[in-house]
Amino acid sequence: MLSRTADHLFWMARYTERAENTARMLDVHVQSALMPQIAETMQLGWRGLLGISELTAAYTERHGEIDADKVLDFMVCDTRNPSSIQSCLRAARENARAVRGAITTEVWETLNQTWLESQRMLQNGLSDQDPGQYFEWVKYRSHLSRGVSAGTMLQDEAFHFLRIGTFLERADNTARLLDVKFHALQSDFYGSVNGRLQELDFYHWSGVLRSVSGFEAYRKVYRDVITPERVAALLILRPDMPRSLAACMMAVNHHLQAVANPQSRETLRRAGLLNAQLQFGRLDDIMATGLHAYLTHFLERINDLGVGISQDFLAA
C-alpha cells in the first residue's frame, strides 16, 4: 500500500474517533453542569477541559475569559479550531475523499452524509438548543462509520490502518477524559486516606461511566456502589472493557503486527511494552505515583507511538 493512502486511512479513522470523543468529553461537562455546584468549580471544569485538550492558548486568544457557552461553541463548531467536532468531521470526510478507491461506497457515503447533516444541524442551532442530543448524534454517526467499515471492507492493510487510527485515538481520548474529570472535581487522585482514594459524588462518576458507555458494564462487573478506584480500574486495566486503555492498546498491538515491516521493529516494541504493562499492571502500582502523573505519562507514550507509526508507515 502507498504510504500516502495509509496516511489518509489512518487519519480518517482518527478524526472520526476524535469527533466522537470530543462529544463524550463535552457531554461529561454538560451533565456535570446540571449538578449543584459553585460557579468557581464549574469554571475550573471548563478550564481543565481546554487544558487537557491543549487548547487553552487558542481559546484565550479568541474569547478571553472562560465561559461555558463560548467553550461549547469553540469545541463544537469553530472551524478555526482543528480539534472541534465540525473540523474533525470535515477532516475525516476529506481524508476519505482522497482514498475513495481504498474504501467501500458505503463507508464513503456514511462519512459524507455525516458531514453534510452536521452542517445542517449546526445551522439549525441544535448544538445550542439541545447539546446533549447533538452529542448523542455524533456518537451514533461514529458508531455507524465503524460498523460500516467492519461490515463492508476487506480486512486487508487498509482495514488494519483504519483500526490502528481508531484505537490509538481512543486510548488517547479515554486517558484525557479521565484526567479532565479529575481536573473538574479539583482532584488529581493524589490524595488518599489509609491507602484508599476519597470517594466522590455518585452522580459525577456515573456521568463519567455513561460518557464512555460503561455504566452498565460497571454494574455487571462490580455489582456495588460506584467508587473512584473501580472506575479507574475499569477504564484503565480491564481488557474486556471496549474503551479501556488496556483494550485499546491490545488492538493497536494486534493490527500493528499485521502490517509490520522491517522499519517498524522499534515501534512494535514500544507498542508491545505498553500493552504488556497494561495487561499485567495493578491499580495499586498506578496509584503509588498518582493517577494524574500516570495518565500524563501515558499520553506522552501514546504521542511517541503515533510519531513512530507515522515515520514507519505513513507519508511525511
Image (cartoon, rainbow, N blue to C red):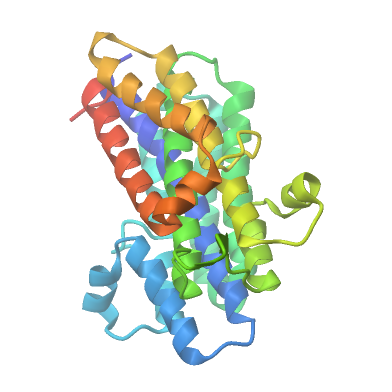
Say which quarter of the image contains residue 198: bottom right
Looking at the picture, does residue 179 appear above or below residue 57?
above
Q: Residue furthest front?
A: 194
Q: Residue at x 42, y 37 (%)?
A: 168
Figure quadrant of residue 193? bottom right
Looking at the picture, tell me which residue is in the foreground, 176 or 124.
176
Q: Residue at x 64, y 50 (%)?
A: 140
Q: Residue furthest left?
A: 316
Q: Is residue 93 left or right of residue 111?
A: left
Please indicate, yes or no, whether residue 24 appears anywhere in the rendered image: yes
138 versus 106 height, above or below: below
**Residue 195: image location, x then y, percent:** 55, 60
Left or right, 56 with respect to 228, comes to left
Question: x%, y% of residue 104?
Answer: 53, 24
The relative height of residue 233 versus residue 248 in the rendered view (above or below) is below
Q: Is residue 24 left or right of residue 268?
A: right
For the residue pair 195 and 60, the one nearer the viewer reads as 195
Residue 85 in picture, x, y percent from top left:
44, 58
How many numbered marks, from 0 up? 0
Examine the rendering and report whether any part of residue 78 can be seen: no
**Along the line of sight, the residue nearer the viewer: 242 or 275:** 275
| Residue 165: image location, x then y, percent | 42, 34
Name which residue lies at 50% across and 53% down: 21
Residue drawn at 68 percent across, 51 percent down: 214
Q: Quadrant of the N terminus?
A: top left
Front position in the image: 216 or 283: 283
Check the picture and name the quadrant holding the C terminus: top left
